């Protein structure tokens, strides 16, 4: 009787010195010279959606998986913005992960963003992954992203001419609004945010206190 063949035992794979338990090691990332194309090819395209890799202002930004409350905040804001955008034919509202390239040699993934109507047909075609124009970009602040969201990305979006940029601060219960026409100067708002993009007959008003009440419930912040 012929015995069944036994597949040869393969030697254990050599550990990849670039990688840690949650993606590429910090040592490897810090030791390299990055460009937006290299980030897309080696980090974004190769890895899972988290950690999130962005290349903004010549700086590699790495963000861990968001906590659940972060996702609730993004969802509640989407439900406020999307009906308004749809009703006035302003484009589409989308969320991370999705490559946004509003400036050369950059790749970013805002938590929430509005794509203008004229950009939608191009990016809906298969194979067109990168979004080049935004009407609004939003980041939900987390402990690991404070400097990146408040400094690096704010400057980036203002310089690229993105009309408006919001940073949602769950601790302070404010929405920090920056406008390109103001040079990126930020304004923390705790009452009402009025967003009036070009082409809309009336502004969208967001009751900030009511928004955070829905997100945080009975929590103290």
Image (cartoon, grey):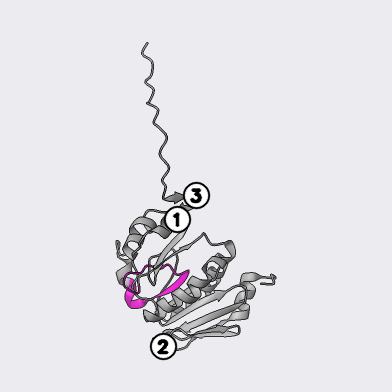
Closest to the camera, between mark 3 and mark 1, is 1
Q: Residue at x 47, y 58 (%)?
A: 51
Provide the residue span drawn in magenta: 102-120
Q: What numbered label is drawn on residue 79?
A: none
Q: Is residue 186 left or right of residue 36?
A: right
Neighbour tally class for label 1: few under 14, some 14-19, many 20 plus, Cα within 10 Å: few
Is residue 195 depicted above or below 55 in this figure?
A: below
Question: What is the secondary structure assignment of the residue under circle 1?
Answer: helix
Closest to the camera, between mark 3 and mark 2, is 3
For marks 3 and 2, give the CA distance.
43 Å
In the rendered structure, does residue 116 fall within the stretch colored magenta?
yes
Question: What is the secondary structure assignment of the residue under circle 2?
Answer: helix
Residue on which the image places disc 3: 21
Q: What numbered label is drawn on residue 181?
A: 2
For this rendering, which residue is in front, 171 or 203? 171
Q: Earlier in the sequence, mark 3 or mark 2?
A: 3
Neighbour tally class for label 2: few under 14, some 14-19, many 20 plus, Cα within 10 Å: few
Q: Earlier in the sequence, mark 3 or mark 1?
A: 3
Is residue 80 depicted above or below 32 in this figure?
A: below
Q: Residue at x 40, y 58 (%)?
A: 31
Q: What numbered label is drawn on residue 27?
A: 1
């Amino acid at each position: 009787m012929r015995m069944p063949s036994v597949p040869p035992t393969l030697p254990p794979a050599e550990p990849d010195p670039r990688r840690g338990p949650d993606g590429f090691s910090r040592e490897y990332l810090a030791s390299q010279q990055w460009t937006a194309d290299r980030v897309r090819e080696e980090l974004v395209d190769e890895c899972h959606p988290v950690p999130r890799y962005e290349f903004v202002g010549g700086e590699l930004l790495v963000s861990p998986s968001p906590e659940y409350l972060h996702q609730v905040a993004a969802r509640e804001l989407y439900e406020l913005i999307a009906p308004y955008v749809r009703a006035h034919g302003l484009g589409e509202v989308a969320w991370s992960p999705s490559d946004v390239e509003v400036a050369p040699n950059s790749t970013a993934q805002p938590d929430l963003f509005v794509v203008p109507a004229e950009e939608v047909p191009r990016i809906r075609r298969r194979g067109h992954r990168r979004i080049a124009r935004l009407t609004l970009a939003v980041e939900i602040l987390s402990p690991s992203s404070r400097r990146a969201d408040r400094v690096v990305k704010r400057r980036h979006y203002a310089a690229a001419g993105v009309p408006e940029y919001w940073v949602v601060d769950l601790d302070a219960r404010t929405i920090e609004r920056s406008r390109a026409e103001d040079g990126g100067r930020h304004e923390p708002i705790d009452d009402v945010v009025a967003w009036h993009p070009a082409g809309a007959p009336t502004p969208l008003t967001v009751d900030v206190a009511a928004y955070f009440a829905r997100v945080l419930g009975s929590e103290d912040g």
